[in-house]
Image (spheres, rainbow, N blue to C red):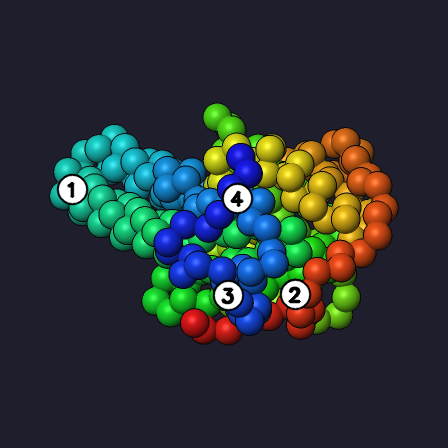
Amino acid sequence: MAVNTPPPELDGPSADGDPMGTPAADERVLWQGRPDLPVLARTAFHTRTVAIYFAGLVAISLVFGNTSAAIVCTVLGVAAIAILQGLAWQSARSTLYILTDARLIMRIGMAIETRINIPLKHIGAAHLNDRGKGRGDIALELNGERMLGNLLLWPHARPWKFTKPQPMLRAIPDAASVASMLSDACANFSAIERNLTEIKEERAGTGQQVNGPAAPAHNGAVQDRGFEGAPA
C-alpha cells in the first residue's frame, strides 16, 4: 500500500535531505512498515523451536518417571520463551522500514537505534520468503564492495550470509506486494532480479526469477552516500 506522507514518527521530511533515516523533502515515501510480532518471534527468535525442544525434554522426563526434571524443564522452557518473546516484541517495536523512490531506510536497534540507508541503485536482487498469511521476508543482495556487517543488521539480516551480508525486511505484512513495489522502484535505476522462492532453500532452479526493465537513473536531489549505518 502506497503512503504519500510520512507519519509523525518520521519527524516529517527533512528539508536538507537527512541521509540517515528521514526522507528528504523531494523524496516520495512508497511504503513503510514494521515486522509482524508473532512471525518475527517464530522465525527470527525461534520461539516455536525452543518450545518444541523443551516440550521434548519434559516428555522424556515424564516417560522415565522423573517428575522433578520435568518441572525444571517446564520452568526453564517458559522462562526461555518469555525472554525470546520479549526480545521479539522489543525488536518489532523499535523497527521501522521506509521505502522511498530513492532509497530504503531501515531504522532498527533494540537498545540503540541505528539508521541504515541503502540507495536503490545498489540493490541488485530481492529474495522473497513467504511465511504464510501474507507475511514474509525480503532479503536484498547489494552491489558493490561496501557491505554492511551482520552485527549491525541483526536480526534484520539473511541467515548464513556472513561473507556478503544481506539486509532483510523481516516478517512484513503483504510481503509480495512490497516485493513488487521494491522491484518497480529499483527498476528506475537498473535491472533487478526478483527471486520468488523461499530463501531458506538454497537449491538452484527451485523458483522463478523476474528481471525488471532497465530505466534511466533517478534525477532527484537526494545525495548518494552509499551504504550507511550509524546510531541515531
Q: Position of residue 158 (x, y in %)?
A: 59, 52
Earlier-in-chain disc, 3 versus 2: 3
Residue type, mark 3 in image: Ser
Disc assigned to residue 71: 1
Q: CA distance from mark 3 to mark 1?
A: 56 Å
Q: CA distance from mark 1 to mark 2?
A: 59 Å
Closer to the camera in the image, 63 or 38: 38
Name which of mark 1 and mark 4 comes first in the sequence: 4
Q: As shown in the figure, which amino acid type bears the numbered disc 1?
A: Ile
CB of mark 3 within 8 Å of CB of mark 1? Answer: no
Q: Amino acid at mark 2?
A: Val
Q: Amino acid at mark 4?
A: Asn
94 displayed left or right of 1:
left
What kind of element bears circle 2?
A: loop
Between marks 3 and 1 in the image, the one whose residue lies nearer the viewer: 3
Residue identified by numbered label 4:
4
Upstream in the sequence, badge 3 or badge 1? 3
* Few, some or many residues within 10 Å of mark 4 (<14, 14–19, 20+): few
The residue to which callout 2 is attached is: 222
- Percent across and percent down for residue 165 are 64, 61
User: In this figure, which residue is indicated by the disc labeled 3?
Assistant: 14
Given residues 159 and 192, the one toward you in this image is: 192
